[in-house]
Image (cartoon, coloured by chain):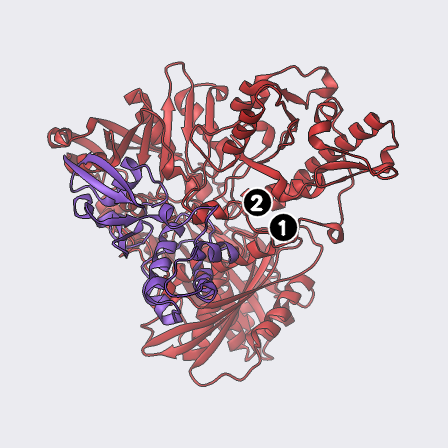
Chain colours: A red, B purple
Amino acid sequence: MASQVNKRAENATRRDFMKIAGLSGVGLMLGFTTKANGAVASVVNISEQAPAAVLSFELLPFVVIDNAGGITLINHRPDMGQATWQAVPMMIAEELEVSLDQIKIQQSDGLRKYGGQLSGGSSTVRTGWGRLRQAGAAAREMFVQAAATRWNANKADCYAKEGKIYHKPTGKSLTYGELVEDASKLVVPKDIPLKAKKDFKVLGKSLPRPEVPSKVTGQAQFGMDVEVPGMLFASIERCPAIHGKVVSIDDTNAKKVAGVKMVVKAERPLPYKTLESVAVLADNYWAALQGRKALKIQWDNGNYPAEMTTDKYFAQLREAAKKEAPSYSNIGNVSEAIGKAAKKLEAQYETPFLAHAPMEPEVAVAHVKEDGTCEIWAPVQGPDGAIEQVSQYLGIAPEKMKVNVPFLGGAFGRKAYLDFVLEAVNLSKQAKAPVKVVWTREDDIQQGPYRPGMLSAMRGGVDANGNIVAFEHTLIGESISGQVFKSFPEGKPDPWAGEGISHEESPYAFPNAKVGFTRVTTDIPIVWWRSVYASNSGFGHESFVDELAHAAGKDPLAVRMELMKDQPRFLNVLKTLGEKSNWNQKLPAGMGKGIAITKSFGSICGHVVYVKKEGTGVKIDRVVSVIDCGMYVNPDNIRAQTEGNIVMGISAATKPGITFADGKVQQSNFHQYRVLRMNEMPKVEIHIIENEEAPGGVGEPGLPPVAAALCNAIFSATGQRIRKLPFDLSKLS
Amino acid sequence: MAAITLTINGKSHEMDVDPRMPLLWAIRDVAGLKGTKFGCGISQCGACTVHIDGKPSRSCSYPVQAAAGKKITTIEGIGSEDNLHAVQKAWIEEQVPQCGYCQSGQIMSAVALLESKPKPTDEDIDNAMSGNICRCGTYQRVRKAIHSAAANKKGNGITGK
């Protein structure tokens, strides 16, 4: 890695500078051994053209510039389709004064100098907005200073543009490549004033994403596409009851399959428990899969067939709803207010377990080498987490690890859970060879981890004047921090599950309001799923606001505006939604409209859904969406992410979830775990609010309000209130 | 094992494989063309779509033996970054891909659709494209890109280049 190549930091004040000298340095700096992601090939080309002359300088951890003119910016957040591959370089480039077509992009490898590298929580732009622009600005200032010194000119007379420094009085210029060696000897300046939004040249523009051409020509390298010389392919048979044990293995027939090299007992380390399995390793994937099918394994399913069922779990949630819950926020006195209310409402909303089902199933290549090092090639959401978990698993120093992250073929939270990487590590250690573990779609659907199924227990009251006087939401179910991290704060609500529903994020001016959480444990493995608990809780929360609005005899949009009148950003989203959706238009018979709004991951998103009755159900006619995510990077990508959230939200609401019976998952592939398809796609339009607020997230905030807006529209069209997901759009009455 | 010769993108590939091996794995792991993707293995998602004698086919469920002697086209045979097909151009213009994993299959289905129906209606698009799942949810852009490719192409049949 770059910083290890040459540690000649020449004095303490210059410890931030890492000079990468020579070709071996360039080679080592770059992560991929196979032809990946464009960046590698480009830099290699430079080396070929001018072998002895090219020197690369890492001015800052995110900015690497060579004296042949190459500019490489590091993307430290793996790209799973949310477009960090462009967003991170755009933030740096804005202040560095380079255009996107001048740069190469490279994925980070997990080293600490890049900071947290997990793509999750819609956090890349939110956390990078200051830091990455500051990195670009610091590098630019170093070039300005280097040029001013070279010309013996005033710094104030020098300015940066398109990768060059110009001297205003004379018009002469020097490229960054010509200046980089001098610039690398300077101290990294700090706290440089950053541009105002009105001065942005790159940020805020719908620029084409640089990796898209490779994704339409089949050239983009995904985790599934990695090949390492000498690697074996593994397909792993796992116990039908996820936590069961291997009793005996008969591999006679498996070993007869041409290409099968070995059959071994394997393990699947979850963060809190290690599961047992049997792996077939072969010289090609198909042989490994055939070998797996030929295995005869006796399993001990324990009590799981009787104990681990979703019916039983949801019955426990309904039971737990009777208990008082620890709260995120508690204003006034809900019980007292409901006691006095003219109309008292109570309802329970249920959301299912869901698989992430990224189009690329889980896949990882690991090579535990004889010299005690380990190299990984895998579509993981965080290379730093992979270094941490794998080095701990192997008992080696993190410095002995190298993690290469190709593009992720979707993830949605699944690929932040590194069981599949540890499986490959375990098998590579056993096989003493690089091993590629490839999950089947059935493995992906049936092995978890899943979004937890949850219950929202709602109570509310409306007074005689039609005012909503009380609102209570208790979210009930398994805790991710409890199950995955063994860190549930007893007596308190789950630290993450209040996203989108706590008073801070759903600041309706109810005089009495309580939002709480009750944990019910399960052995069904769970993890974060796009928008995490807000994907569950948004349904009950915003559906119940609708129920209360109807009970109060008020328009669902108008009542929200009234209750948000002191919340200008919410109010603006609601007002814009009303205008863009033409909310007050008279609808033809058989049509209905629904609205919902959620703030999650730092952004406010509202949807209006129009449905029309068709046969025994409804058809979604149109979705109008408004998002306020503050200042932003690429508006076209905000539209793309929100379109995606709407599609995923409709799938989550109307397609089968994951159910367990007899200890097993009852769905196996896309014929049973169905998702939205082209013929079901409604017209969708996205509107973005313009302001100069700090950036919010974009990858998730569009999802939580989808189900509620849809079900509120169904109520408006049919009078039927849906309180349990999933449901079938075509069979409502 | 059996000696099989495949013709992929006009090039001959000789291989010694299990004749029941799905064409998908022969294309990816033996011929080394990684653009065609594995998504489900049971013809449900369309990520593995290739053209066999011009017809869109799910290579994950097509025995390699049955493909011998036929003309196979994969995404790599449709166009390259230097020589994009009209459909690929439209895909870039509309910025269709998000993660991109399903997009080879989407494009193969779309190219086949436009070859049989140069001016497809929304219903034609629903019929031709509903076998291709996109979990990122790019359907609206796929639809728009197909209409845009249809509008931009000239002459009969989408030669595209």
Circle 1 sits on which residue?
A633
Q: Amino acid at mark 1?
A: Val
Quarter where residue A671 is shown = bottom left
- Is residue A323 at least partly visible in the picture? no
Q: Amino acid at mark 2?
A: Gln
Q: Is residue A67 above or below residue A220?
A: above
Closer to us: A189 or A284: A284
Q: Is residue A324 above or below residue A708?
A: above
Numbered label attached to residue A86: 2
Label 1 marks a residue whose chain is A
Query: Does label 1 or label 2 sit earlier along the sequence?
Result: 2
- Label 2 crowd bin: few (<14), some (14–19), many (20+), radius 10 Å: many
Q: Would residue A659 appear left or right of A169 to someone viewing this image?
A: left
Q: Is residue A406 above or below residue A335?
A: above
If the image is split into quadrants, where does the N terminus of chain A sit?
top right
Q: Provide residue B87's location: percent of width, then percent of height.
A: 43, 57
Q: Do residues under tags 1 and 2 come within 8 Å of each other at their CB atoms?
A: yes
Q: Provide residue B148's location: percent of width, then percent of height.
A: 47, 64
> Which element type, helix, strand or loop, lies under badge 2?
helix
Label 2 marks a residue whose chain is A
- Is residue A154 at least partly visible in the picture? yes
Quarter where residue A674 is shown = bottom left
Closer to us: A334 or B70: B70
Q: Residue at x 42, y 41 (%)?
A: A415
> Which element type, helix, strand or loop, lies under badge 1?
loop
Q: Residue at x 30, y 51 (%)?
A: B50
